[in-house]
Amino acid sequence: MEKVKVCIQKLPGNEDISLPRYMTEQAAGMDIFAAVAGEETILPGQRKKIATGIAMALPEGYEAQIRPRSGLALQNGITLLNAPGTIDADYRGEIGLIVINHGEEPFVVKRGMRMAQMVVQKVCQAEWMETAELKNTSRGEGGFGHT
């Protein structure tokens, strides 16, 4: 599996928070952890920004996608809004998670809890070539359940 070196920084006061890490040998996503001061309760239907205590510098041509954890979603109804979230190569601020509780019970976020996954991927930028007509395909304009 290809590897890319990424500079990461634990922000002040978060030395105890684990760096993102792969939980299995062939995992695509690495778990990222909550850096809340103590505990944060998210009520049913409520959303909150949860700190991770880390910032990073991705190489040019890469992005990091922030995705929900399936276990939290299934067991507690906890997921992320704006998922997948994108961290651009030129962003240097703290990574934050927009967490929502779709469950029926309050959910308590504890310091160091695994809250999301992060996938680092190569990206390219599109260069538009405006045209008066697009090449036809067998699908054509069919969408939203067409296939």
Image (cartoon, rainbow, N blue to C red):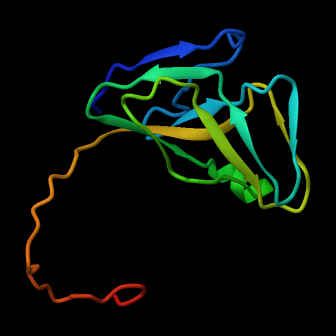
Q: Is 16 above or below relative to 130?
A: above
Number of marks in picture: 0
* 68 sits to left or right of 113: left
Q: Please state, as top left, top right, bottom left or bottom right, where the N terminus lies in the image.
A: top left
Q: Position of residue 26 (x, y in %)?
A: 42, 37
Residue at 26% in and 88% down: 141
* 111 sits to left or right of 122: right
Q: Is 146 above or below relative to 135?
A: below
Query: In terms of image quadrants, where is residue 34?
Result: top right
Residue at 62% in and 41% down: 116
Nearest the camera: 41 or 119? 41
Query: In terms of image quadrants, where is residue 97?
Result: top right
Q: Please state, as top left, top right, bottom left or bottom right, where the C terminus lies in the image.
A: bottom left
Q: Position of residue 132 (x, y in %)?
A: 8, 78
* 66 sits to left or right of 105: left
Q: Is 22 above or below relative to 123?
A: above
Q: Position of residue 131 (x, y in %)?
A: 8, 72
* 136 sits to left or right of 87: left
Nearest the camera: 26 or 14? 14
Residue at 78% in and 61% down: 102
Q: Position of residue 140 (x, y in %)?
A: 21, 88
Residue at 55% in and 26% down: 20
Nearest the camera: 106 or 70? 106
Query: In terms of image quadrants, where is residue 87?
Result: top left
Q: Is 67 above or below relative to 15?
A: below
